[in-house]
Image (cartoon, helix red, strand yellow):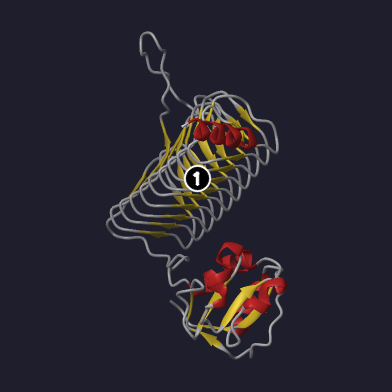
Amino acid sequence: MNKIRYLDIVNQLKKNSIEIESNIDSKSIFSGINTLLKSKTNDLTFFSNTKYIQDLKKCKAKACLIEYKYAHSLPEKCTPIITNDPYLALAFISELFNNQKSFSNGTISKNVTISNNSKLHSNIEIGDYCTILDETEIFDNVIIGSNSKIGPNVEIHKNSIIHDNVSISNAIINENCEIKSGARVGSYGFGFEEKTKQKIKHIGNVVIHKNSTIGSNTTIDRAVFDSTSIGEFSQIDNLVQIAHNVIIGSHAIIAAQVGIAGSTQIGKNIKIGGQAGIAGHLVIGDNVTIAAKSGVTKNIPDNNVVAGFPAKDINLWKKEVIRNSLKK
């Protein structure tokens, strides 16, 4: 982990329009960033959840990202860094402490197969044993890890990172996206005529909009005719299945092992807990939260929170859980 000056932290947050206030010397250096209980005397820590208020009082860190109203609970030797959103500040600061390379070195391995019908722009890094197939265009500053297969019919736009063992076909990956190891994007969907099991030819694609992350071993199927679409600034966890023709709006957060069946439309700012399942051909509104292990079988209007199977308003679900527990 990198050692970081407090001045670097100030500049990083200022660049992202986050204001902070602290008495720390600008020349101070932090050796790491850690949780409240595990932090050491030269570490930076953060407090953003009142569940950990007792841990806050035991903190040994040099400084803590914290809201003003909780700063009085800090030990005397831990200096507060006052901010309105400590967790957001942490997200930006974590980039400073990260040793993982996130910029291309412009080197293409000698052990790469590249189609003559593909186009590569400048400063692209491609690892060992990758294959770049026909009708593929890779833009500036893209990184592609080892053993990945890209194409056919793929665009990967600038500053995107494709990790090891990824396969992408029939897809547009927009700028600043990250596709983690083992992901499969653009394969045929699960489509066939039910009686005869005759498969339906998928001729659409997948579009992942800018600044989105696709987790390890997640699969996103190409559309039958148009596009399976993931909105910008979305975070898709590992082991998620997104079927053909699904449309997901911007700023989605989808936890591991979620399954979304074909042709379902999901609005922006969605939150889906782990192992939830969503049936096909549904419409899920904006700002909806779906609790973990829920089974969604009907449309959900905007601004709703649902849980259970079949999924319903979370307050009704909680009442049912209480009634059922009293019967036992």
Residue at image coords 40%, 43%: 239
| x and y, in percent, of residue 135 in the image | 44, 40
Amino acid type at mark 1: Glu
Crowding near the residue tagged with mark 1, few <14, some 14–19, many ≥20 C-alpha atoms within 10 Å: many
| x and y, in percent, of residue 172 in the image | 52, 42
Q: Quadrant of residue 169?
A: top left
Q: Nearer the viewer, residue 148 or 321?
A: 321
Residue occupying the far front of the picture: 327
Q: Nearer the viewer, residue 300 or 156?
A: 300
For the N terminus, give its image quadrant.
bottom left
Residue at image coords 52%, 78%: 58
* 117 w.r.t. 328: above or below: below
| x and y, in percent, of residue 52 in the image | 55, 66
Q: Secondary structure at mark 1?
A: strand
Horizontal side, residue 249 vs residue 115: left or right: right
| x and y, in percent, of residue 171 in the image | 49, 39
Horizontal side, residue 240 vs residue 131: left or right: right
Would you say residue 49 is visible in this rendering?
no
Would you say residue 152 is visible in this rendering?
yes
Q: Nearer the viewer, residue 72 or 91?
A: 72
Residue at image coords 50%, 41%: 292
The residue where tag 1 is placed is 155
Residue at image coords 47%, 43%: 274
* 218 w.r.t. 38: above or below: above
Q: Quadrant of residue 289?
A: top right
Q: Nearer the viewer, residue 276 or 166?
A: 276
Q: How many circles with numbers are drawn on the protein?
A: 1
Residue occupying the far top of the picture: 195
* 238 w.r.t. 300: above or below: below
